[in-house]
Amino acid sequence: QPQRRGFVRNTLKAGLCDVMMEAPVGYQRATETIPYYRSSYVFVSRRDRNLKLRSFDDPALRRLRVGLQVIGDDYANSPPAEAMGRRGLTAQVVGFPVYGDYGHPDPLAPIVRAVTDGTVDVAVVWGPTAGWFARSSRAPLTLTPVAATAGDDPRLKFAFDVGMGVRHGDEALRRRLDDVIRTHRPQIAAILQRYRVPVVPAS
C-alpha cells in the first residue's frame, strides 16, 4: 500500500501485517527494531553530465533544473525542499509527488526518469527509491549522497537509520527481529546491494 497518511493505521494497527519493513529510528507510530541499514537522500544525475554535486551550497544549483519530491497536502516539506527553500532556490524546482500516482505502474519512477530523459538536470531523491529505478535507466546515472553543511539547520537531516517496525507492545517480535538483524548482517547487506540501496556509514 502507498506509504502515505494512514498507512500504519490501515496496515499494522489493523492487523493486516505484523512488520513494517522500513521504520526510521525515532518513528513514533510503531516500535522499531535496531537499524539494519542507513541511507540518505541522493543527488541523481546523468553520468555524462559530470555535475559532481555534493551539497545544497553548490553554486551550480542556481542554474540547474532540480527535480524534487514534494509532499504536498500533508503540510510538511521534505528535508531537501526545506534546504532548497532556505537558500532561495525554489525557482529551480520541478516538483514530483513523493507518493507517486498509484494508478500507474512504478509510481515513484517519474522523478528518476526525468533525469534520464533530460526533463531535469538533477533530482534529489530518497536513496532506496533512486537506487532501484537508476538500475534500469537507459543512461548511466550517478547517485551522490547529499552532504549537510554549516548552512543547514542542524535539525535538518538528509540521512536516516532504518529499522523494521512492529505494533507498540509487541516486544517479543521486536526482540526476534533484532536477533535476526544481528545474526544476518552479511545476507542483509547482499540484499541491499542487489536492490542498489545507497548505504552510508552508521551514525
Image (cartoon, grey):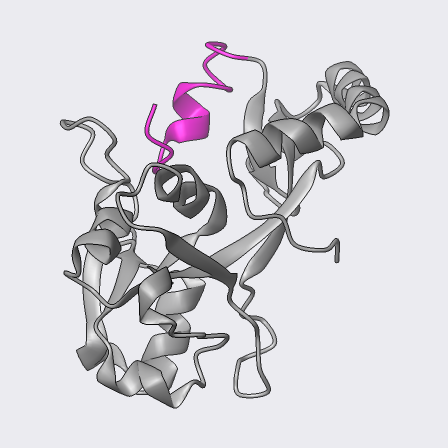
Place of residue 111 in the rendered image (x, y in percent of width and height, measured from the top left): 25, 51
Place of residue 126 in the rendered image (x, y in percent of width and height, measured from the top left): 44, 51
Height in image: 122 above or below 190? below
* Quarter of the figure that contains the C terminus: bottom right
Q: Residue at x 39, y 29 (%)?
A: 7
Place of residue 64 in the rendered image (x, y in percent of width and height, measured from the top left): 24, 78
Q: Determine the image quadrant of residue 82.
A: bottom left
In the image: residue 2, left or right of residue 160? left
Q: Residue at x 34, y 85 (%)?
A: 60
Q: Residue at x 48, y 58 (%)?
A: 41
Height in image: 130 above or below 6? below
Q: Could one spot residue 121 in this view of the protein?
A: yes
Q: Determine the image quadrant of residue 135.
A: top left
Place of residue 149 in the rendered image (x, y in percent of width and height, measured from the top left): 57, 82
Residue nearest the observer in this picture, 197 or 50: 50
| Residue 88 part of the magenta-drawn span | no
